[in-house]
Amino acid sequence: MIPLTLAEIASITGGTVHDGDGAAVVTGTVEFDSRKLTPGGLFLALPGEKVDGHDFAAKAVEAGAVGVLAARPVGVPAVVVPPLPPGQGHPTAFALTADKDGSGAAVLAALAKLAQHVVRELVAKGLTIVGITGSSGKTSTKDLIAQLLEPLGPTVAPPGSFNNELGHPWTALRADESTRHLVLEMSARGRGHIAELAVTAPPRIGVELNVGTAHVSEFGSREAIAEAKGELVEALPADGVAVLNLDDPLVAGMASRTKARIVGTGEHPDADVRAEGITLDDQARPSFRLVTARGSADVKLPLYGEHHVANALSAAAVALELGSTVDEVAARLSTVERRSGRRMEVVQRADGVTILNDSYNANPESVRAALKALASMSRGRRSWAVLGVMAELGADSVSAHDEIGRLAVRLNIGRLVVVGEAAAAMHQGASHEGSWGEESVLVPDTDAAIELLREQVEPGDVVLVKASNSAQLWRVANALLEDGVA
């Protein structure tokens, strides 16, 4: 963050300085976890499900914080912000379930104002903000974009999937005078959410990846999801750039909703940044020819799954816009690393068992992509798909789970382990698609899945673990990995 006094922060957020004179300068990071504070930082007092950050204000100052951004006086230097007017603010994806009095919403609104002020100052000094949205692939693409931009100048991007009303401004406030690129994920659980995030940190480049069925229970339809996702390109300035995946018709249709210049990506013949000749090696790692108007070059992605090609093209488009050459982009894409955990994280045990830990989240599109990667990686080896519920699919839940089970049969996956009654339609679909017996099994929970796998997985098998985060299937992947430690 840029240096600001508590008095300046109070002026920006509409708050009042308490228990201090306001002259103290915040020079460190803004944190909601008091354990991560550094000297000179600002602590966010947020109510949580189990604890209230206001109760940790004194410890935060003892740990080096200059002050606290709070909804009430806390006995140490603080900027105290007023409650929001009725009807303003909304619960975040961070689940501020203890926010009964609106204090969390007030602090989050103040945080957004602070981030907006800081990024406005930094944009005037040359900062470029890149916003990314899509039903799947946001985090992987964010990681790719960051790695392509880092050689061009200091770059800030969020850890993991930090993309809501808390993570978005928190990430924006990691930028300082030296930062050249700020890469932000933008999520939505309703209309207007992305538009609000775009006000907090206005992007000049917007990346639209895809429109799938994630959160369809909240939106009602893919078309409604597209309406919400398109708020990103609507927020772009006339001198901005909208990077649109032309392989997705709903994304391609967003071109009419922006005044920014369009850069199309994909395998579509009209794409400005295009992939040709896609092939997969025996580990499902894709290679392709990157084709642009400025030239072409070969790319060999060290990532698992063909779905990463679309992500790589979006990242390439951003890097090309910000000064990279085609050869530089191709070379950097061929050496990128997976930065965020539990997203096609591939580990091979000493006995040859390969584990594809993709347990961070799941929707029908991402599960299909993971199953295809599993099928490609396991040629000549026995494959296991350990799948749990895909949450928030609404009325389409049963049919979507049924279709995934049928796809596992069509891809010739060796064994399907369905975890939890909420995902039972996967087991039913597999059983109806093929004359399966023990090839598909429904188990009640993660403990039962772990027990079954420990009994039946053999050296050389390939095991995919994937579900929505709420299913906690990461426990299955961790157990398998621990079993492989000598």
Image (tube, helix red, strand yellow):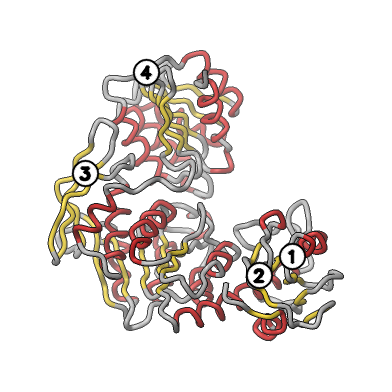
Residue 108, numbered label: 2
In the rendered image, is residue 431 in sight? no
Q: Give the Cα separation between the discs numbered 4 and 3.
A: 25 Å
Where residue 70 appears, as percent x and y from the top left, is: 76, 71
Q: Give the Cα separation between the discs numbered 4 and 1.
A: 50 Å
Please tell me how crowded label 3 is: few (under 14), some (14-19), or many (20+) other residues with Cα within 10 Å.
many
Q: Which residue is mark 3?
A: 287
N-terminal label among 4 and 2: 2
Residue 48 vs 413, above or below: the answer is below
N-terminal label among 2 and 1: 1
Please tell me how crowded label 4 is: few (under 14), some (14-19), or many (20+) other residues with Cα within 10 Å.
some
Q: Which one is nearer the viewer's eye here, 187 or 52? A: 52
The answer to which image quadrant residue 95 occupies is: bottom right
Q: Give the Cα separation between the discs numbered 2 and 1.
A: 10 Å
Q: Which one is nearer the viewer's eye here, 387 or 117? A: 117
Residue 45, numbered label: 1
Residue at 25% from the left image edge and 30% from the top image edge? 282
Where residue 234 appears, as percent x and y from the top left, is: 39, 76
Q: Are marks 1 and 3 in contact (CB under 8 Å)?
A: no
Q: Are marks 4 and 1 in contact (CB under 8 Å)?
A: no
